Every structure is written in structure tokens, then in C-alpha cells.
Image: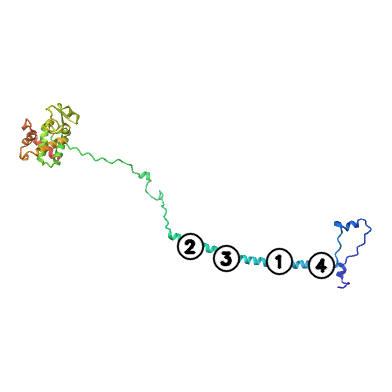
Amino acid sequence: MHRDDPSEQNQTPPPVASRSGDPGSTGRTIGRHRKPEPPRRGARKLLASTPVRVALATGVSCCLGVAAYAGTRDDGHDRSEPLAEAVADRAALADERASRSLERTVATPTPVSPSPSASPTPRPSATKKKTTAPKKPPKPRKPRPVAGLTQAQMDNAKIIVDVGRELGVPKRGLVIAVATAMQESNLYNYASGVLPESQDYPHQAIGWDHDSVGLFQQRPSSGWGTVADLMRPAYAARAFYLALLKVPGWQDMALTVAAQSVQMSAFPDAYAPHEDRATTVVDALT
């Protein structure tokens, strides 16, 4: 390098005057108060060229940083691809499991209750049936009285006819039985004043002909049955029919003879006047 270079001349600092005579010069040149020395010629050239080198280093660093960042992004992109594939595989596996579960499981449909506006069916409280007791069988209608009989007399006549029909007695025997009861008790169930026991049972009248009781005035002392039995119209009628059926040829006999064969009455001809009325009653009941 030549001395006559203007740049070098400008960079050469002027000589510093000696200030040895200054009493404070010693303190200024020592320690923290030491005055910095001017840079040398080589140092000035280094400082002059430093900005260029810093700029170059900075540029190189930036390039390296961009390259590193680009490499990092590429690496991250490459790494994200396996992660996305794993997520896709897991989603496919979940779909496959869900499809298998749907194939094996039959879903039970949930019943949908109809809305009141869509269905005309009334509410359950409105359609609820009341609990009713079982109906009792209707009572048989009472027969209408005929031949001048009262309702009580007609009811007793019906019992006599019903018992005879159960035993298979022909109509002639029914007429004989009703006519006999008309003569003996006027078709009323009699108790006896001689047998106070007979009055403990349902009865419609009280008689005084010895111990005779019931519709046919049968006597317990003659072996017709107990007082309790003979006071029941059905039992008394059955006892009469069984005795009549034992009389040989009763169907060919006159009514009064057939009745007397059973009753052994002191007035055997008293039954004949009741035949027509008894026939009217039996016709009405059969």
C-alpha cells in the first residue's frame, strides 16, 4: 500500500500531544477512567471491512435458516402423511366394526304412541269397563193363574206338575195329583195345629185334621215322611206320585177311584168335582 493513498492519509490520526504535565493524566490512563486508545491502521481497515463481512454472514445465515425451515416443513409434511394414513385406517376399521354390529344386531323398533288428534280412540279412562258382578240367573216367571186360582195356588200347582214330569208321569197322572191337592188342601201348604213343629216351616195355612200336613195332608204317623219333609211341596208331590204308580191299572180308573186308592180318604167321592179345573190347570202348565 502506498503512502500517498488519500484514504490512508485520512485514516491516520493526528499525533496526540503529550499531557504528562497534567496531574490528572495518570488517573485518566489507568483503570476505568483510562482513555481508550485510538485504533491502529490495521484495525481501522478491519472495522471498515466489518460491515461487509457482517452483511455477508447475515445473508448466509438467512439462507441457511430458510433452507433449514424448508427442510423442517418438508420433514413435517412427510411425517404427517403416515399419521393421516393411520387415522384413515382407524376410521375404516371403526366403520367395518359398525357395519358388522349392524348386521348381527336387529334393532327393536320403538313403539310410537299415537297422538290424541291422530287417533279417534278415546282415553283409557273413558274406555275402561266397570267391573260388574256376575249376573244371577233370571228367576223363572211365575205362571199366570187360571181356573180361578190365586198366584200362591198356581205356584203350588206348578210344583206338582213339574215333579210329575220329572218322574215321567203321563198327563192323566198330573191331573189326578192336582185334583187330589185341590180337595185335600185347596192347593195351600198346610201346617197342623196338632203338630206345633210343622209351624216352624214355611206354610200358608193351619189345619186341625189330626197330624195331617202339606198339600196332600199326608200324616207323618202313617209313614209318609217326617214333618220337615212333608212340609216341602216338592217332597209331598213326589210321595203321592210314587204311591199312585204302585196302584195297578190306575190309568184306567176313574179319577176319584185312583185318588182314593192313594189317599184312603173318608170321603172317596169328593175328588171327582175337581177334575175339570185340574185339567185346565195342567193344560196351562204344560
Does residue 240 show up? yes
- Residue 96, numbered circle: 2
Disc 4 marks which residue? 46
Inter-mark Cα distance, 1 to 3: 31 Å
Q: Earlier in the sequence, mark 4 or mark 2?
A: 4
Q: Earlier in the sequence, mark 1 or mark 3?
A: 1
Residue 140 percent location from the top left of the image? 20, 39
Q: Earlier in the sequence, mark 4 or mark 3?
A: 4
Dot 2, how many residues are within 10 Å of its Cα: few (below 14), some (14-19), or many (20+)? few
Pick the residue in front: 280 or 255.
Answer: 255
Tag 4, which secondary structure? Answer: helix
Q: Nearer the viewer, mark 4 or mark 3?
A: 3
**Which of the 4 image quarters holds residue 210?**
top left
Q: Earlier in the sequence, mark 2 or mark 1?
A: 1
Asked if residue 206 is positioned above or below residue 51 in the image, the reply reads above
Pick the residue in front: 53 or 125.
Answer: 53
Which amino acid type is marked by label 4?
Answer: Leu
- Residue 82, numbered circle: 3
Residue ID at (77%, 68%): 53
Which amino acid type is marked by label 2?
Answer: Glu
Q: Nearer the viewer, mark 1 or mark 3?
A: 3
Tag 1, which secondary structure? Answer: helix
Which amino acid type is marked by label 1?
Answer: Cys
**Which of the 4 image quarters holds residue 202?**
top left
